[in-house]
Amino acid sequence: MNPVVTQPRFGAGGATASEWQSGVFDCFDDMAICLCGTFFPLCLSCQIASDMNECCLWGGSVAMRTMYRTRYGIPGSICNDCLCLTFFPTCTLCQLKRDIEKRKAMNAF
């Protein structure tokens, strides 16, 4: 019996290795997203979920961030996702939305 040595990737054909398009604390890279995340975090969560064709309730979840990371081959762990969303929820939501917007602009979303 052969042991599993690599984790399967989400999506057709697997994802290629990638990185976040901006850091967790690069909130001022996009002021509109920063302001939305600061004053209307539930709206930002729903925008993220809508972008990913998911239920609005899942936009700010560990599962959504983990799924996104897996889809684009971004290194990390579920534990890291959980810690980011627990201690820096607004910054983490903004990072995810900025990444989505940058990938859309590159036609890579």
Image (tube, helix red, strand yellow):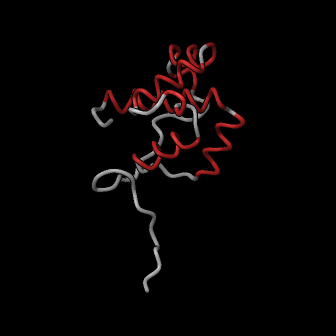
Of residues 86 and 25, the one drawn nearer to the viewer in this rendering: 86
Q: Residue extending furthest bottom? A: 1
What percent of the width, then of the height, locates residue 72?
Answer: 40, 46
Residue sitting at x 39%, y 29%: 102
Of residues 5 and 43, the one drawn nearer to the viewer in this rendering: 43
6 lies above or below 108 = below
- The number of numbered discs placed on residues in the rendered structure image is 0
- Viewed as shown, does residue 53 lie left or right of 89? left
4 lies above or below 15 = below
| Quarter of the N terminus within the rendering | bottom left
- Viewed as shown, does residue 67 lie left or right of 26? left
Of residues 42 and 38, the one drawn nearer to the viewer in this rendering: 42
- Viewed as shown, does residue 13 lie left or right of 93? left
Residue sitting at x 50%, y 52%: 75
Residue sitting at x 65%, y 39%: 84
Residue sitting at x 28%, y 56%: 13
Of residues 55 and 90, the one drawn nearer to the viewer in this rendering: 55
| Quarter of the C terminus within the rendering | top left
Location of residue 87 by image quarter = top right
99 lies above or below 34 = below
Q: Residue extending furthest right? A: 87
- Viewed as shown, does residue 92 lie left or right of 108? right
15 lies above or below 58 = below
What percent of the width, then of the height, locates residue 7?
Answer: 45, 64
